[in-house]
Image (spheres, rainbow, N blue to C red):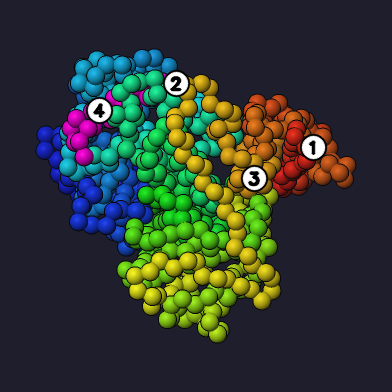
């Protein structure tokens, strides 16, 4: 989601051609754990353990005025990405943005469809094909991985003022085909990645997922199957939901399987923004603490390894300048270069969880609820090194400590910030304390689970050359049975006929949706805001994840102070899919401090959810 700008240093260019960038080296381990915008602080990124970077190439800025423009040098300097493309780390290049001169209809700005996509890439009238041929030639042998667009699943108006694609799925299929052909013509060994989509942009609105819609268009092209539908891997961006990180991999795999495709899936962005940074605090709504962000980093990387993602990217290296429009605090580093706790957590993940050869699987315990299993466990084995890493955390239903069957000769317990101590052996088990779960907050991001900080149990001296079953786990305070995981969907023996896909293929089953069934968030005002007396236009989102179509919400109401204690009714919302708007009338409110209550009711079962927070009427 967040916008991709990078920074600083290195390398002169000759005659407007690109400086060297780091390609994936055949003799090195495949890059797995990366950082978006790593080049903005490349030394710190390498010390953190990042093995790849991501750089954004905006077509509308490189060729703003016509096909003869080529402002690549100026663009690299303005965006500060010379360090990213200067050879320090392998680069994943993201290309997007249509200049007005190249658009079929420029009314949608940079999200417009380029002209000439129905023509061969080498045809001068195929504007995007000509751009990609030139860009790929400029970086041949230096950048070997290209992602074509970012988050095209957002439709106009669904992500504030920021969206990247105004065309149809058929238009995008033609863009993907053009870009693939151009890149492969220059470098047949390059990797072309289907753009990262967010899953939720489609799922909460009851739409078939963008990946499936584009593949359905490809099905109409007889050349698509023999060309792998014109991509080599698939990307996704998932934020704040551990459940989504694990499950969406299976959703994408099932869509690919319908077309007899087996492609790597990449998690190119994940994170959850913070509100309590001492140097740059921001409102709490939709954000978490810096310590919770560090815990989320380790837990999300562990679950991504268990799911099977080939690459995992953390967004991002450093906070952006507010002038870019990116206000949330995403960075491992603050703008002044000092690290947040998540930086140390990234080092832990890079050291213990990022070896591509690890055999990883999810082995939780107990029966899951909205916050996950009582004990979530990811097991990562290295038969070559005879080591095992078990990442464990608990929900409110889990015990304070567990006893893990010992399979190695020695063990240590490592916390999320890298602190380490020898594990205590009790008979044939290791005693592992589990930190308490966080307390859920009304301003939590949708789907954010209230779980404890993870701990890593690291064993050495396992039996040589074996991949062992996950060790038994017990607790003195409660019974812990291995959880029953959902079986993966079978791959269909034949591809389905070209008919409308069965609804709701876009959405996970209700039981698999991240977080509670009912979700309610308020865009404005924010907690502790000053609200003038009079009318205020408010907006937010409300939906029931159990709904198979529409939002599953039939009423959203706003009250000043608790409705059940005689609070003042300020208005009811106008509903449009998962989004709501309310014109709230504060003209009769007494000045001073109040609590604002927003209630949403499910149309499926009448259940209610409410969000409340303090405001001041002036």
Tell me where residue 567 appears, x and y as whole percent: 84, 41
Question: What is the CA distance from the residue labelled 3 to the residue labelled 4?
Answer: 41 Å
Question: Residue 585 falls in which quadrant of the image?
Answer: top right
Task: Return the residue nearer the eye: 345 or 202.
Answer: 202
Q: Is tag 1's residue or tag 3's residue first in the polypeptide sequence?
A: 3
Circle 4/circle 1 CB separation < 8 Å: no
Q: Which residue is mark 4?
A: 181
- Dot 4: what SS? helix
Q: Is tag 2's residue or tag 1's residue first in the polypeptide sequence?
A: 2
Q: Which mark is residue 168?
A: 2
Q: Is residue 277 above or below residue 409?
A: above
Rate crowding at label 2 as few (under 14), some (14 to 19) or many (20 or more) other CA atoms within 10 Å.
some
**Residue at 38% across / 24% down in the picture?**
218
Q: Main secondary structure of the magenta part?
A: helix
Q: Which residue is mark 1?
A: 606
Residue with the most extreme front position? 493
Closer to the eye: label 1 or 3: 3
Tell me where residue 93 appears, x and y as whole percent: 30, 40
Tell me where residue 16 appears, x and y as whole percent: 15, 34
**Residue at 60% across / 56% down in the picture?**
484
Question: What is the CA distance from the residue labelled 3 to the residue labelled 2?
Answer: 31 Å
Q: Which residue is mark 3?
A: 511
**Residue at 59% across / 69% down in the picture?**
435
- Dot 1: what SS? loop
């Amino acid at each position: 989601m967040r916008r991709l700008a990078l920074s600083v240093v290195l390398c002169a260019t000759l005659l407007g051609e690109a400086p060297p960038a780091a390609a994936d080296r055949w003799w090195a381990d495949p890059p797995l754990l990366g950082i978006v915008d790593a080049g903005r602080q490349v030394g710190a990124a390498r010390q953190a353990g990042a093995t790849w970077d991501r750089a954004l190439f905006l077509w509308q800025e490189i060729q703003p005025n016509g096909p003869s423009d080529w402002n690549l040098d100026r663009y690299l300097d303005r965006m500060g990405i010379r360090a990213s493309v200067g050879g320090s780390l392998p680069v994943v290049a993201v290309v997007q943005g249509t200049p007005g001169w190249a658009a079929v209809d420029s009314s949608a700005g940079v999200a417009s469809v380029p002209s000439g996509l129905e023509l061969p890439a080498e045809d001068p009238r195929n504007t995007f094909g000509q751009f990609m041929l030139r860009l790929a030639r400029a970086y041949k042998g230096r950048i070997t991985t290209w992602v074509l667009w970012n988050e095209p699943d957002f439709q106009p108006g669904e992500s504030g003022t920021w969206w990247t694609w105004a065309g149809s799925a058929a238009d995008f299929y033609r863009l993907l085909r053009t870009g693939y052909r151009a890149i492969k013509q220059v470098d047949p060994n390059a990797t072309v990645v289907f753009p990262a989509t967010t899953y939720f942009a489609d799922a909460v609105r009851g739409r078939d997922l963008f990946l499936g819609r584009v593949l359905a268009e490809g099905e109409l092209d007889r050349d698509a199957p023999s060309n792998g539908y014109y991509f080599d891997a698939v990307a996704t961006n998932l934020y704040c939901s551990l459940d989504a990180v694990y499950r969406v991999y299976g959703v994408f795999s099932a869509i690919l399987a319908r077309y007899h495709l087996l492609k790597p899936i990449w998690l190119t962005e994940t994170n959850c923004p913070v509100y309590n940074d001492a140097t740059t605090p921001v409102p709490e709504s939709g954000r978490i603490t810096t310590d919770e962000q560090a815990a989320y980093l380790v837990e999300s990387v562990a679950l991504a390894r268990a799911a099977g993602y080939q690459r995992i990217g953390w967004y991002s290296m450093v906070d952006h300048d507010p002038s870019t429009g990116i206000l949330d605090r995403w960075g491992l580093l603050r703008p002044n270069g000092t690290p947040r706790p998540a930086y140390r957590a990234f080092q832990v993940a890079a050291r213990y969880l990022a070896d591509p050869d690890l055999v990883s699987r999810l082995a939780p315990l107990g029966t899951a609820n909205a916050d996950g299993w009582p004990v979530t466990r990811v097991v990562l084995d290295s038969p070559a090194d005879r080591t095992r890493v078990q990442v464990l955390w608990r929900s409110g239903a889990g015990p304070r400590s567990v006893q893990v069957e010992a399979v190695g000769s020695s063990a240590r317990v490592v916390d999320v910030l890298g602190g380490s101590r020898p594990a205590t052996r009790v008979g044939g088990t290791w005693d592992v304390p589990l930190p308490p779960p966080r307390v859920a907050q009304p301003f939590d991001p949708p789907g954010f689970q209230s779980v404890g900080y993870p701990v890593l149990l690291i064993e050495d001296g396992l039996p040589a050359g074996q991949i062992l079953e996950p060790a038994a786990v017990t607790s003195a305070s409660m019974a812990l049975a291995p959880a029953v995981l959902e079986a993966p969907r079978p791959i269909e023996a034949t591809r389905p006929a070209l008919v409308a896909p069965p609804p709701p293929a876009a959405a996970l089953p209700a039981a698999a949706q991240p977080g509670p069934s009912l979700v309610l968030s308020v865009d404005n005002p924010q907690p502790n805001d000053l609200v003038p007396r009079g009318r205020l236009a408010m907006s937010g989102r409300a939906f029931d994840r159990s709904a198979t179509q529409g939002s599953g919400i039939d009423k959203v109401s706003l009250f000043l102070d608790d409705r059940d204690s005689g609070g003042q009714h300020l208005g009811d919302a106008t509903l449009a899919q998962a989004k709501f708007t309310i014109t709230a009338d504060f003209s009769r409110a007494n000045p001073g401090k109040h609590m604002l209550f927003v209630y949403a009711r499910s149309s499926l079962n009448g259940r209610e959810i409410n969000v409340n927070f303090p405001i001041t009427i002036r």
